[in-house]
Amino acid sequence: MESWSPLALRVVVTGAAGFIGSHLCDRLVADGHSVLGLDNLSTGTMRNLRGLREHARFSFRTHDVCTEFDCAGRVDVIYNLACPASPKDYLEGPIRTLLASALGTRNMLDLALRKAAVFLQASTSETYGDARVHPQPEGYWGNVNPVGPRSVYDEGKRFAEALTMAYNRRHGVRTRIARLFNVYGPRMRRTDGRVLPAFLDQALRGVPLTVFGDGSQTRSFCFVADIVDGMVRLAASGVCDPVNLGADEEITVLELASSVQEAVGGSSGIEHHELPQDDPRRRCPDISRAKRVLAWEPNVGMAEGIRAMLASYRAGGASTPGEEPVGDG
Ligand code: UDP
């Protein structure tokens, strides 16, 4: 029987087998906490949890958050990450995406209420939509097309934020809302459709990089370890208002393509494709609140982060979904 430090928490993480969720589980277990991971394995994979499966303080249940959930014993903190997050995934599963944000968040808030746990909702910069204010502070209410194809994600997450605040106001649940901007790092599926895995995969295969539109749209990319650190700090803070977590260095998609080609070596060229509907033109977080209330800012620069991701892909990580052993949990 292992001894517990006084600060050891019992934590539930939904979306535990996903890209960010699995890194969060790694961090929480490394910090000495006990973690119960939940995932329906629709976009996540048990491969992401390989390092934890045998760990005494980690357990896993295959569970869809849309179904009510309960567990025995104390729960101190719930991190609610379960939701398809790449545009390709959520456009392919529009209804399950909305329900993951609606029913999933309701079920996990109910668990937080029963257990008197801190509840952290993983939200998104997509709540700002095609922003008219730049960079985006938390006080900006956003410009979202409520009936466009992306609304299944954007409005789902906006509903999840509203529900989180309602449980806070109505039931006194200690809630947190992390608005995550573009995150990248090892374990992103090479074919999940997001720009960095797509570019790295294409450059490694020596085929042209698929730039949507003219490539002048911007994003800011934050390495996953920094995001996880921000979420852990936010959970421990008393801050109920939303907090942006992301890198505040804005780059165009074309600049990103060049950086990837430089990191991989060789040039496979670029191929322009149609810009998806409602693709935000500019995105960059104002992170002054996170700096002030969490003493947080990103540490890993893009060149270093891309090198780490590239190394993991070269080592055979994040294979295509068809090659992944799904459902062994
Ligand atoms: N994008 C691209 N080529 C790709 C995938 C994405 O040019 O193969 C663009 C996309 O149109 C968007 C940006 O890269 O402007 C980021 O897209 P991603 O899907 O990674 O995330 P988003 O920020 O749109 O949710």
Image (cartoon, rainbow, N blue to C red):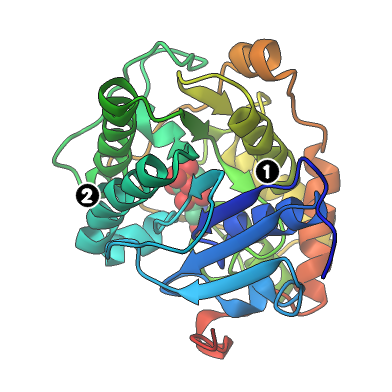
At a point 56% along the width and 41% down the height, the residue shown is 182
Can you give x and y, in whole percent of width and height, for residue 273 in the image? 42, 56
Mark 1 vs mark 2, foreground winner is: 1
Q: Does residue 216 appear left or right of residue 237 in this picture?
A: left
Mark linked to residue 149: 2
Residue 202 position in % (x across, y down): 63, 68
- Within 10 Å of disc 2 (Cα), the crowding (few <14, some 14-19, many 20+) is some
- The image quadrant where one finds the C terminus is bottom right
Q: Earlier in the sequence, mark 1 or mark 2?
A: 2
Residue bearing the label numbered 1: 228
User: Residue 323, located in which quarter of the rendered image?
Assistant: bottom right
Is 214 left, or right, of 190 in this rendering?
Answer: left
Q: Tell me if 167 is positioned left or right of 49 in this view.
A: left
Mark yes or no: residue 284 visible: no
> Can you say whether 117 is above or below 193 in the image?
above
Going by the numbered disc 2, the residue's amino acid type is Pro
SS at mark 1?
A: helix
Q: CA distance from mark 1 to mark 2?
A: 28 Å
Figure check: 109 above or below 204: above
